[in-house]
Image: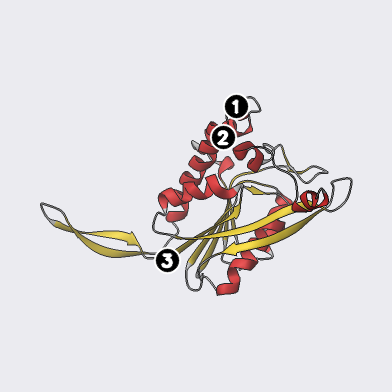
Amino acid sequence: MQVINFSEQNSIINQFLYELRDKNMQKNRLLFRHNVERIGEMMAYEVSKKLEYKPKTVTTPLASLEMSLPKDDIVLGTVLRAGLPFHQGFLNVFDRADNAYVSAFRMYINREHTEVGIQADYIAAPSVKGKTLIVADPMLATGGSMAAAIEALLMSGKPKKIHVCCVIAAPEGIEVVKEALPDDATIWCASIDEGMNEHKYIVPGFGDCGDLCFGEKMHSFRKLADKR
């Protein structure tokens, strides 16, 4: 299985990632979302190089010529809600893709907030059978929500190829996701960071991606139910 870490290369992705990490620049929510989207666009371009291609003739006002175009049917999946700007970046590039959405979120299951469980409540997806599946989720921390999303999407069939794409990953999360993937899958990361702290946040990371994109949330539906 191939794991690609763009932070080991010199590219403009590092500039966008720098701005995502900077705690002062994070105050600009629009800029934060835009940088997540731009990393998605750059990563989608790199993924496009791994697709299968076929020749097709195009006729211009002056002549005809043969071009090489992607032949893959793509399903682009994401995990709500933090994945939305990242997903949009991929959709800007793969604008003909079918789309899949999974609601899978982590919940602390002890008072110390050191252990997490995954709650999956909703999925809206086409069949992935025989298609190229791209799962775009900006944060790969414990790997639980990503693995749950992959397992949910694979219920509709076996895809031709799977690409897992994230902005920041922890080594522990990568190992968990590998268990849910076939050997020919590829994991793409803008950066693989040192690891996680006791609260299962990626370090150095940049914090809670969903909150930084859209504002703070109540941390679980269970807490909401307890107040009723």
Q: In the current view of this chain or complex, which residue is farthest to the front?
A: 228
Residue 48 at what x, y percent from top left? 43, 55
Left or right, 117 with reference to 206: right
Q: Report the label total.
A: 3
Point out which mark residue 32 bears.
Answer: 2
| Residue sitting nearer the eye, 150 or 122 | 122
- The residue that appears at 73% across and 44% down in the rendered structure is 218
- The residue that appears at 70% across and 42% down in the rendered structure is 217
- The residue that appears at 47% across and 44% down in the rendered structure is 42
The relative height of residue 66 versus residue 82 in the rendered view (above or below) is below
Q: Would you name the residue on which mark 3 appears?
A: 73
N-term mark: 1 or 2:
1
Q: Would you name the residue on which mark 1 appears?
A: 25
N-term mark: 3 or 1:
1
| Residue sitting nearer the eye, 120 or 43 | 120
Q: Amino acid at mark 2?
A: Phe
Residue 155 at what x, y percent from top left? 60, 73
Do callouts 3 and 1 mark residues in contact (Cβ within 8 Å)? Answer: no
Point out which mark residue 175 bears.
Answer: none
Q: Quadrant of the N terminus?
A: bottom right
Query: Is the residue marked by circle 3 packed among few (<14), some (14-19), or many (20+) residues within 10 Å?
Result: some
| Whether residue 65 can be seen here | yes
Residue 82 at what x, y percent from top left? 61, 46
Residue 149 at what x, y percent from top left? 63, 61
Query: Is the residue marked by circle 2 packed among few (<14), some (14-19), or many (20+) residues within 10 Å?
Result: many
How far apart are labels 3 and 1 at the CA level? 38 Å
Q: Amino acid at mark 1?
A: Met
Q: Amino acid at mark 3?
A: Asp
Q: Regarding mark 3 in the picture, which secondary structure is present there? A: loop
